[in-house]
Amino acid sequence: MAHSFTVSSSELLLEAPIISVRRDQVAMPGGKDAAREVVEHFGAVAVVALDSEGRVAVVEQYRHTVGRRLLELPAGLLDVAGEPAFDCARRELREEAGLEAATWGVLVDLVTSPGFADEAVRVFVATDLTQVERPAAEDEEADMTLTWVPLDRARRAVLEGRVVNSIAVAGIFAAAASLESGVEPRSVDEPFEVRPTALAERRRGVGSGGDMKRI
């Protein structure tokens, strides 16, 4: 029989606005326990927005963790209590790219760093686009720029090392594969089964409604 990795105890090490860190004691094969640190995350969404000319909307945003601007897809945290992933994707596309879409699908679900974090991202595809007013942005997003790149050129930029954001890499290649293979994107109603829950449930448990980043 497959071993059951049960948790005997957990300790919260860090509580911060967009992450928490906990240490679990986990039963290992052979009878001993081992400590495993887990970075808890709200999860996120990203959007491959394709126009009628086959171009993808790409944003450039400063990321302090790597000290540089990265080429990315419009994306955002699932940090609003109870908000469906699809609603978050529509909001982020409007806020970051000034776009709305009439046609949507699910391209791919990602567990971004399963060795130490529970973050998962659902990547949508959006077509039949309409330009709308983009709300005023703050912090890094005030410096964000938007460009349109042919999908084949975006895929080449990945292979050339100019697009390194893992969510953008997956979304660009998934969109290209979907178009080339004829495999239709999944329904936006399909359950997001790998969406992380630990951080959101704890924040809601202590009364964090609405914006769960407020602690």
Image: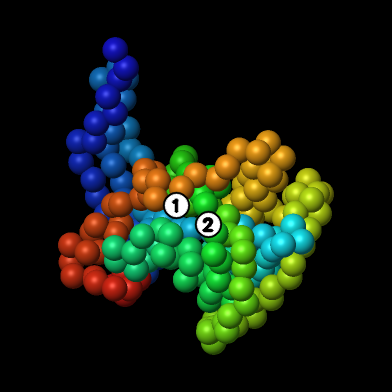
At 55% across and 59% down in the image, what residue appears?
103
Tell which circle, 1 or 2, labels the residue nearer the N-terminal end: 2
Q: Is residue 206 left or right of residue 125?
A: left
Q: Amino acid at mark 2?
A: Trp
In the rendered view, tell whether residue 73 sits above or below residue 97: above
Give the image location of residue 138, x and y in percent: 53, 83
Tag of residue 55: none
Tag of residue 104: 2
In the rendered image, which quarter contains the N terminus?
Answer: top left
Q: Is residue 38 left or right of residue 172?
A: left
Query: Can you tell which quarter of the image residue 2 is in?
Result: top left
Q: Amino acid at mark 1?
A: Val
Q: How is the image coloured?
A: rainbow
Q: Please name the residue that numbered disc 1 is placed on.
A: 188
Please tell me which residue lies in front, 27 or 101: 101
Task: Label 2, secondary structure: give it.
Answer: strand
**Residue 86 seen in the current view:** yes
Give the image location of residue 8, x and y in percent: 20, 36
CA gap, disc 1 to disc 2?
Answer: 7 Å
Please tell me which residue lies in front, 18 or 92: 92
Query: Can you tell which quarter of the image residue 25 is in?
Result: top left
Give the image location of residue 180, x and y in percent: 72, 40
